[in-house]
Image: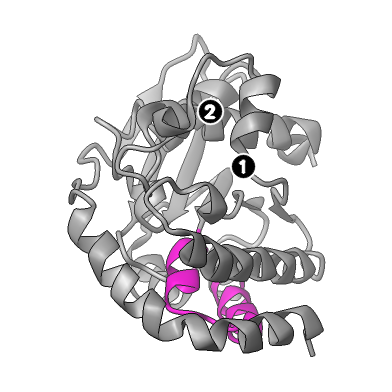
């Protein structure tokens, strides 16, 4: 049993009625940005080799808040990888706003048509936190997701991107950041345990914290610059996030494993 999660859940129970009304107010004030419409692209290189990247997940992977996926997470990740991969990098996005890990497994994985994939990057956790998913249930859903992907691509590296930095969301109130922000940390710890039981499956466990990113990537930005609507990343944040994941992939030598 996860003692910290259990204690946190007990402390959070009295806050649930307030969170319900705050959540409705937050939802009303957040503009509804669409998903990016360019779901695939190519980074051409002077090479006869090809490399297929697919990204899977929720609204952040779908590019909500960015003008395009080419300038968002997936396109930037492909561009960053091109500096290390001597091949023409094709990328494709499989994602949907509002989807949890279970929804992705049930509705998105069956849609994937690529015969050969060289790297799979997954971004999930926000919606599972918003529906108050327990770590035990999250563990089960993530395992089912990995197993279904593995049945299609037995040897392809799978990388889970950082969990959403909910405690950094500028649109959220203090109680929301406390309850949902702590829950997403527990889900992240559970994800870390899950990936360790699989071969060639990785998780970028380092948190996406504003002050760390600004210092590490020498950025001139405010917290508001990182969000398009107070919840979803801005184009700047998508690019910073993609660079962080690309650095992790290079550091772990995942593509040469």
Where does the C terminus fall, quadrant-wise?
Answer: top right
Say which residue label 1 marks: 208
Q: Nearer the viewer, residue 187 or 84?
A: 187
Q: Nearer the viewer, residue 161 or 105?
A: 161
Among the two numbered marks 2 and 1 on one chain, the one whose residue lies closer to the N terminus: 1
The location of residue 182, given as percent across then percent down, is 63, 67
Q: Of the numbered discs in the image, which one, if any, rests on residue 240?
A: 2
Identify the residue at image location x=43%, y=36%.
74
Q: Is residue 161 above or below residue 146?
A: above
Q: Nearer the viewer, residue 4 or 205?
A: 4
Q: Is residue 253 above or below residue 86?
A: below
Queried whether the magenta region covers residue 202, the answer comes back as no
Q: Which range is magenta?
A: 124-146
Identify the residue at image location x=39%, y=38%.
227
Where does the N terminus fall, quadrant-wise?
Answer: bottom right
What crowding class fits label 2: few (fewer than 14 Cα within 10 Å), some (14-19), or many (20 or more)? many
Marks 2/1: CA–CA distance = 10 Å
In this rendering, would 177 be left or right of 224? right
What crowding class fits label 1: few (fewer than 14 Cα within 10 Å), some (14-19), or many (20 or more)? many
Circle count? 2
The location of residue 4, given as percent across then percent down, is 77, 79
* Disc 1 secondary structure class: loop
């Amino acid at each position: 049993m996860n003692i910290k999660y259990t204690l946190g859940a007990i402390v959070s129970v009295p806050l649930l009625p307030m969170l319900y009304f705050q959540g409705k107010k937050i939802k009303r004030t957040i503009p509804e940005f669409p998903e990016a419409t360019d779901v695939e692209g190519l980074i051409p290189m002077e090479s006869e080799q090809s490399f297929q990247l697919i990204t899977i997940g929720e609204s952040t992977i779908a590019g909500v808040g960015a003008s395009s996926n080419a300038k968002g997470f997936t396109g930037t990740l492909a561009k960053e990888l091109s500096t290390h991969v001597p091949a023409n990098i094709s990328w494709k996005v499989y994602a949907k706003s509002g989807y949890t890990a279970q929804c992705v497994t049930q509705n998105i994985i069956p849609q994937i048509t690529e015969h050969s994939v060289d790297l799979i990057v997954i971004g999930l956790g926000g919606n599972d936190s918003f529906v108050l998913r327990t770590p035990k249930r999250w563990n089960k859903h993530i395992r089912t997701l990995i197993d279904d992907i593995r049945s299609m691509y037995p040897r392809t590296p799978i990388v889970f991107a950082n969990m959403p930095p909910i405690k950094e969301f500028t649109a959220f109130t203090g109680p929301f950041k406390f309850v949902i922000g702590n829950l997403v940390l527990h889900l992240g710890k559970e994800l870390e345990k899950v990936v360790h039981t699989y071969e060639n499956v990785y998780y970028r466990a380092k948190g996406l914290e504003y002050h760390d990113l600004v210092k590490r990537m020498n950025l001139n930005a405010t917290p508001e610059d990182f969000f398009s609507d107070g919840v979803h990343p801005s184009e700047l944040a998508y690019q910073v996030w993609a660079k962080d994941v690309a650095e992790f992939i290079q550091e772990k030598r995942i593509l040469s494993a």
